[in-house]
Every structure is written in structure tokens, then in C-alpha cells.
Image: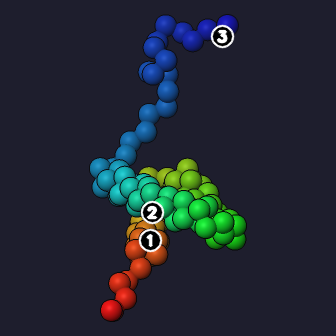
């Protein structure tokens, strides 16, 4: 067993300092990704119910992209955080619109 020294493990971890604005923007970006991911769920369920394998592949690929972007996002990369927030808000809105198509006039 490796000698961890007399300091607690948490004190041995590297220290990171986040700017409060960076931290808040990062959390907003994560939330945008999570909302887009949540908007995928009813569409995936519908594609499964309808037996539409092509649509299901497309939606699952989008979900995989959500996970990858969330895992790759770094709070210190302000430009990418802003771009991810914008992109996933747009995706969320697009997906929600597909979930509830406009009512047709009678």
C-alpha cells in the first residue's frame, strides 16, 4: 500500500480556483445540455413506439453528443462554454417544438 503521508487525501489533491462568473456560466451550460437531453426522451420514446429505427439512431446520436459535450466541457474555456450554452438552448427549443407540433386549424 502506497504511503499517503500524514495529510488527509483531500488536502493532497491539486487546488483549482474558479472565477465565480466562469463557474456560473459553466453551470448554465451544463443545464442547457441537460434540458436538451431531457427534451430527447419523449422523442426517443415516440420513435421506439412507432418503430422508426432511422429516427431512433439520429436521436440516440444526439443524446450521445450531449454526454460527450458535457464531459468535455471545461469551466475555464469561456468561449466554448458560451457556444455550448447557445447551441444547446437552440437544440432544446427545436426538440420541444417537435414534441408538440403546432395545432392545426379546424
Q: Is residue 46 above or below residue 68?
A: below
**Closer to the camera: disc 3 or disc 2?**
2
x 33%, y 92%: residue: 105
Q: According to the image, label 2 marks what residue?
A: 39
Q: Which mark sits nearer the N-terminus, 3 or 2?
A: 3
In the rendered view, how is the structure colored?
rainbow
Element at badge 2? helix
Residue 66 in the image, given as x and y percentages of width and height: 54, 59
Q: Which mark is residue 2?
A: 3
x 54%, y 59%: residue: 45
Marks 1 & 2, CB-CB < 8 Å contact: yes
Q: Which mark is residue 55?
A: none
Q: Which mark sits nearer the N-terminus, 1 or 2?
A: 2
User: Hey, which residue is sitting farthest bottom in the picture?
Assistant: 106
Residue 26 in the image, given as x and y percentages of width and height: 39, 54
**Closer to the camera: disc 3 or disc 1?**
1
Residue 57 in the image, given as x and y percentages of width and height: 68, 65
Q: According to the image, label 1 marks what residue?
A: 99
x 44%, y 34%: residue: 15
User: Could one spot residue 90 in this view of the protein?
Assistant: no
The residues tagged by marks 3 and 2 sit, at their Cα atoms, a distance apart of 46 Å
Please name whichever residue, 91 or 74, is drawn nearer the observer in this view of the structure. Answer: 91
Element at badge 1? helix
Q: Quadrant of the C terminus?
A: bottom left
Q: Which mark sits nearer the N-terminus, 3 or 1?
A: 3
Badge 1: residue crowd in 10 Å (few <14, some 14–19, many ≥20):
some
User: Could one spot residue 53 in this view of the protein?
Assistant: yes
Amino acid at each position: 500500500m502506497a504511503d499517503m503521508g500524514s495529510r488527509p487525501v483531500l488536502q493532497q489533491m491539486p487546488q483549482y480556483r474558479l472565477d465565480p462568473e466562469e463557474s456560473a456560466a459553466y453551470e448554465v451550460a451544463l443545464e442547457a445540455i441537460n434540458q436538451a437531453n431531457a427534451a430527447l426522451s419523449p422523442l426517443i420514446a415516440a420513435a421506439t413506439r412507432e418503430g422508426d429505427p432511422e429516427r431512433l439512431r439520429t436521436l440516440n446520436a444526439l443524446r450521445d453528443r450531449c454526454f460527450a459535450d458535457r464531459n468535455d466541457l471545461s469551466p475555464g474555456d469561456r468561449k466554448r462554454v458560451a457556444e455550448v450554452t447557445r447551441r444547446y438552448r437552440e437544440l432544446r427549443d427545436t426538440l420541444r417544438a417537435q414534441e408538440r407540433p403546432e395545432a392545426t386549424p379546424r
